Image: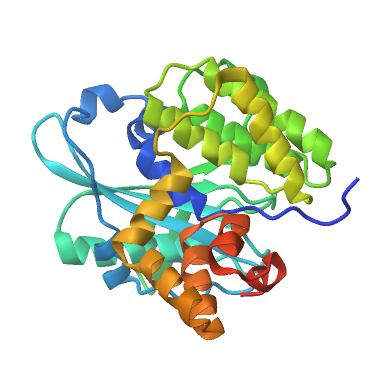
């Protein structure tokens, strides 16, 4: 049995949230059909968010992803939904509440649009449960409350009975927390179980492929060959799908930014430095490390150290 902690590809949260956002709203907000106009497309404000909060290296022991989305309400008005996913926190260093408040006031100051915020806590720290930010000084006080959803608190049986496709995403994260040191064979069995859970829910092909890629790549096998075995076993069940999913979605974004072209140019010229820079960009986007290695010629060990 593996004694090291398994790698979790947390940037996958960004793409899967975008692929399943209507399901996410229905999962988190039970009044969604009466409030949100889900017939209108969502506007994913990644560039706008990065302008307000330029990417920075997360502090040691803290990992998170953010998603800012503009949605329309039944009355025709606009609202922003801020989704923050905290994958790992460091006890005593958690500044999530303050960070959520900072997100709120900068977004409000820039856009003057109502904001609802949800923090999905996918960490393993049982005492880490931020949901309010307070300030008080000499008669002046401020309180900011935000939605908080702790994955490790969820009941596995409740998630399995919930037919919303987003429940499979939460179940995947929950089982990752519960099974940190399981063997590759045990992990493969869990992934088959998650696949069966996914098949039992109604969703379109794009969403199904996205969920499949999330449960496949979210937690890595120690032995990359087991991943190939798992995928072949899934192919035996239903055959390969050619629908764009999370992996292809990330590659498509990379091509639009010219990264894929850059990889080919870098390989042709044999420039190791350029291959490293491109691999780092792919890693930031959440592409599986094994695929980055194939595309750049770098080793898995080299990419993991980036």
Residue in the foreground of this view, choosing between 90 and 226:
226
**Residue, far front:** 268
Measured as percent of width and height from the top left, residue 16 is found at 44, 42
Give the residue at x 72% y 69%: 301
Q: Is residue 141 visible?
A: no
**Image coordinates for residue 244, horizontal then vertical, percent:** 39, 38
Q: Nearer the viewer, residue 84 or 195?
A: 195
Q: Residue at x 76, y 29 (%)?
A: 189
Residue 38 placement: quadrant = top left
- The answer to whether residue 152 is visible is yes
> Which residue is rendered at x = 40% and y = 64% of the image?
260
Q: Return the residue nearer the eye: 156 or 271.
A: 271
Which residue is at 36% across, 52% downward? 252
**Residue 283 shown left or right of residue 41 in the figure:** right
| Quadrant the C terminus occupies | bottom right
Q: Please tell me whether residue 157 is drawn above or below residue 100 in the rendered image.
A: above
In the rendered view, would you say 269 is above or below 145? below
């Amino acid at each position: 049995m593996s004694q090291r902690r398994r790698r979790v590809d947390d940037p996958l949260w960004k793409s899967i949230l975008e692929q399943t956002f209507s399901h996410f709203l229905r999962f988190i907000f039970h009044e969604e059909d009466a409030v949100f106009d889900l017939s209108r497309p969502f506007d994913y404000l990644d560039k706008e968010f990065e302008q307000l909060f330029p990417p920075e290296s997360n502090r040691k022991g803290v990992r998170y992803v953010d998603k800012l989305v503009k949605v329309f309400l039944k009355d025709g008005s606009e609202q922003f939904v801020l989704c923050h996913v905290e994958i790992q926190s460091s006890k005593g260093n958690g500044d999530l509440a303050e960070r959520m408040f900072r997100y709120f006031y900068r977004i409000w100051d820039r856009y003057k649009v109502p904001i609802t915020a949800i923090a999905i806590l996918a960490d393993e720290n049982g005492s880490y449960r931020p949901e309010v930010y307070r300030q008080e000084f000499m008669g002046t006080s401020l309180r900011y409350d935000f939605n908080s959803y702790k994955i490790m608190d969820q009941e596995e049986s409740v998630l399995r009975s919930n037919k919303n496709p987003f429940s499979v995403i939460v179940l995947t994260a929950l089982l990752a927390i519960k099974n940190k040191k399981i063997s590759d064979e045990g992990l493969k069995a869990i992934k088959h179980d998650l696949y069966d859970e996914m098949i039992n829910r109604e969703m379109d092909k794009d969403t199904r492929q996205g969920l499949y890629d999330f449960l496949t790549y979210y937690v890595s096998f120690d032995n990359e060959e087991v991943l190939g075995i798992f995928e072949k076993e899934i192919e035996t069940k239903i055959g390969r799908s050619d629908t764009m999913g999370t992996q292809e979605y990330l590659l498509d974004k990379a091509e639009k930014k010219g990264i894929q072209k850059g990889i080919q140019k870098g390989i042709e010229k044999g420039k190791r430095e350029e291959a490293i820079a491109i691999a780092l960009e792919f890693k930031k986007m959440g592409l599986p490390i094994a695929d980055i290695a194939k595309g750049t010629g770098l080793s898995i060990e080299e990419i993991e150290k980036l």
